[in-house]
Amino acid sequence: MSFKKFLAIGTTLVLVGGGAAYLYAKGFWGVADTPAASAKVIPDEAVMAGFISTDPQSWMKLQKFGTPELQTLVNQSLENLQAETFKDSQISYDEDLKPWLGNVMVAVLPTTSPEAVDDFNLLTVVTIKNKFSLLKFANQLKTEEKLGKTEEIDYNGLTIVETIDEGQTFYSAVLRQHLVISCHAFKL
């Protein structure tokens, strides 16, 4: 092999490896999908938090417990939940969400308003398995106008998207490999 071919192959490997390392470091794939990784995004003021695994293997383990009737009831409840969640939309869990949706952590934060004693702020942190798939899904929502009115807000260099749909306001932002969603404006 000539020196030029060796140099060309070596340069190509370094560039490809560097590009892959850059994408990995930016969270485009290969993210840590653990409760500890998601908890780093949740503010210290959280009253409580829960973690939901989207790993099918974890859910299959639950099928070993209980009577056949209870197993049927649980499976039916999960199917009904999925059907109810997406009944008013054209969103498909398997096609639109599953490619990018990782595990989910939900946290309850205290209210920011002294008048609303019983009010709480629910913060959802979703691990992004694949940012390319999330971007594709987000662009699909924009072009099909499935979102309500949206506005981008710049907060200290972070883009927060405010969405108003059917009278409800939601805020979302991408923090490295996590999608953070809240019905109240959040400060990071």
Image (cartoon, grey):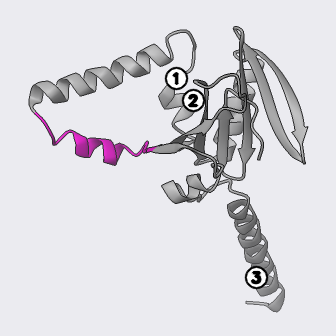
Residue at image position (71%, 53%) is 176
Q: Nearer the viewer, residue 15 or 141?
A: 141
Q: Is residue 84 left or right of residue 5?
A: left
Q: Quadrant of residue 166?
A: top right
Which badge, 3 or 2, comes first in the chain's sequence?
3
Q: Quadrant of residue 62?
A: top left
Q: Nearer the viewer, residue 36 or 113?
A: 113
Q: Amino acid at mark 3?
A: Gly
Q: Which residue is mark 3?
A: 10
Q: Quadrant of residue 113?
A: top right
Q: Is residue 179 left or right of residue 173?
A: left
Residue at image position (26%, 26%) is 75
Q: Is residue 74 left or right of residue 39?
A: left
Is the C-beta separation of discs 1 and 2 under 8 Å?
yes
Q: Position of residue 148 (x, y in %)?
A: 75, 14
At label 1, counting other C-alpha atoms closer than 10 Å, the crowd grade (few under 14, some 14-19, many 20 or more) is few
Q: Nearer the viewer, residue 29 or 126?
A: 126
Q: Nearer the viewer, residue 102 or 185?
A: 185
| Residue 60 is one of the magenta-drawn residues | yes
Residue at image position (76%, 22%) is 163
Determine which of the numbered discs, if any, sits on residue 92 in the image: 1
Q: Which residue is mark 2?
A: 96
Q: CA distance from mark 1 to mark 2?
A: 5 Å
Please provide the residue range marked out in magenta. Answer: 51-66
Q: Is residue 140 above or below residue 6?
A: above
Q: CA distance from mark 3 to mark 2?
A: 38 Å
At label 3, counting other C-alpha atoms closer than 10 Å, the crowd grade (few under 14, some 14-19, many 20 or more) is few
Judging from the image, what secondary structure is the residue with disc 2 in? helix
Residue at image position (76%, 47%) is 188
Q: Position of residue 19 (x, y in %)?
A: 76, 65
Which quadrant holds the N terminus?
bottom right
